Image (spheres, rainbow, N blue to C red):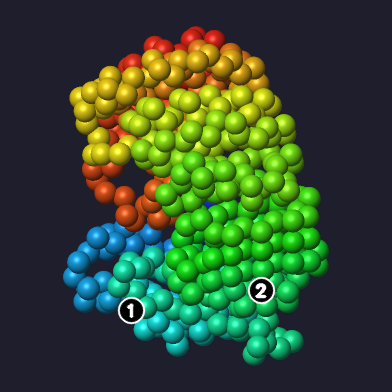
Amino acid sequence: MEKRACLISSSVQEKDAYKLVDRISELPDEILVRILSLLPLKEAGATSTLSRRWLYMWASTKNLNFDAEETVRRYYWEYNQELKDQESSKYVDWVNHVVEQHREQEDLEQFRVCFLGLDNRFTSSIDKWIQFAMKKRVQVLVLDFVTRLYDAKLYTFSNYLETSSEHFSFESLKVLHLECVNVTGDVLECMLRNCPFLEQVSVYYANNLVELSIVGPSIALKYLEIRYCGDIKRIQIHDANLVSLSYSGRPIELDLSNVPLLIEVSICYDGFTDESMRLAFTHLSCCINQLQTLMLDIPMFVQVHHKNFPVLPNLKNLEVRVCADACRNTLPVLTSFMKAFPNLQRLVLKLEFSFPFNPTEGEKMFKGLCYGIYTEKCPHRNIKVVEILGYRHASTTVELVNYIVKNVVALDKIVIDPARNWAFHGTRANKRIEEVKLEEEARDHAMHFIRKEVPSSVEFVCL
């Protein structure tokens, strides 16, 4: 009996020992590095305490995403500048430390920095980060300096290719995103000419970008996004392989020719008027028949009279930002779009409201402006999915849903999403608690009232 007990005890110990074997640490270094590259950088760094072998393993990660979104959200509305500067300095020190520790031989898939107030005060450190990324043959470079533009002296992205060499270049760069970073057209054009794999460029809030010219099939660029660069006057794109173009800001000279692959366009003109809408379609005349996705903004209180939009025979996806409480605009323009885009399959409406939202006031405006004037029927037989983003609980939005249900005769699915993600920074740092409360109210209203308006044959989704 005693012998049997000893055998059982020995067996249990062996099983326990088997369970405690560290199988992960037995994996080859390259697999461990790949696993660590999937973790947030701080979590990857925390593995250095596991054992001697893990001490510097994190320093080989190929994904340096200096994610500090929680801190960004916490301090975005902080008015104590000294406190914000302290946090910025801590962030810079963290990035500097990681850059110094990273193993020499490892290339980078991504180098991303995103924090508050990284302006020209930190030029020396930021220059070193970019040179480090170049040396590591980075594929994705993101500099997002979440800056209040009215009091900012932006960091300037220089022509680093002038100092490049065989071991110090952007030859592997595929994606470049600059936000609240100054960069000139000359610098961007030089990079496009000399970076053979650079397919995606996005520039937000660059104060000194005036002109940008992209000419020739040798340029690899496929996706271009320019947003709110205050001094820009002209974008020229000729004989290029561009697939997607997005522009937001004041009306500019948009010169397009021979862009056979361009199928996705987003245009958001400040102060969009009837004339600027005509201008937008004029700019797109060379590719109008090939477009598959179009995104437009029609801001508040703009009376758009131009109903004879050009026919876009291949358009499949339409996203329109509209003023939901300016009823006299929304429905006639929507009707015109439905007539002009006969093969549309997906319609996305981004709703804006012209005053701090109040259901009673919204109902008054609805009665005053009267949807009844614009009840022209326009059956559309190809739209399958409708998404209503930024939904708020108002009579005007209920009428909008009713109009869609009655006219989109082949509707399979309707999605209601109260979030206005397009209105906020990617970190949602500038999203106030009041906005979250409005979303909760709108979500509850949609579930109780809008759901009743949707036929049972149509899938209803509320996010």
Residue located beneath label 1 in the image? 89
Question: What residue appears at the point 40 percent right and 39 percent down from the top-left corner?
Answer: 302
Does residue 11 sit above or below 362 in this rendering?
A: below
Classify residue 424 as left or right of residue 102. Answer: left
Quarter in which the C terminus is drawn? top left
Amino acid type shown at disc 2: Glu
Q: How many marks?
A: 2
Classify residue 263 as left or right of residue 375. Answer: right
The percent coordinates of residue 377 (x first, y second) are: 53, 14
* Dot 2 alpha-carbon crowd within 10 angstroms: few under 14, some 14 to 19, many 20 or more: some
Give SS at disc 2: helix
Does residue 253 sit above or below 314 in this rendering?
A: below
Residue located beneath label 2 in the image? 189
**Which residue occupies the foreground of this view, 418 or 264?**
264
Question: What residue appears at the point 39 percent right and 12 percent down from the top-left corner?
Answer: 452
Does residue 319 sit above or below 119 in this rendering?
A: above
Give SS at disc 1: helix
Considering only order in the chain, which callout, 2 or 1, is on the residue closer to the N terminus?
A: 1
Classify residue 430 as left or right of residue 461. Answer: left
The percent coordinates of residue 270 (x first, y second) are: 44, 52
Residue 25 appears anywhere in the view: no
Nearer mark to the viewer, of 1 and 2: 2
**Which residue occupies the foreground of this view, 456 or 357?**
357
The percent coordinates of residue 416 (x first, y second) are: 43, 28
Question: What residue appears at the point 44 percent right and 84 percent down from the top-left corner?
Answer: 123
Residue 271 appears anywhere in the view: yes
The percent coordinates of residue 21 (x first, y second) are: 56, 57
CA distance for labels 1 and 2: 32 Å
Q: Given the current orientation, which residue lies at the most extreme right position?
A: 217
Amino acid type shown at disc 1: Ser
Question: What residue appears at the point 59 percent right and 74 percent down from the top-left corner?
Answer: 185
For residue 255, which quarter of the picture? bottom right
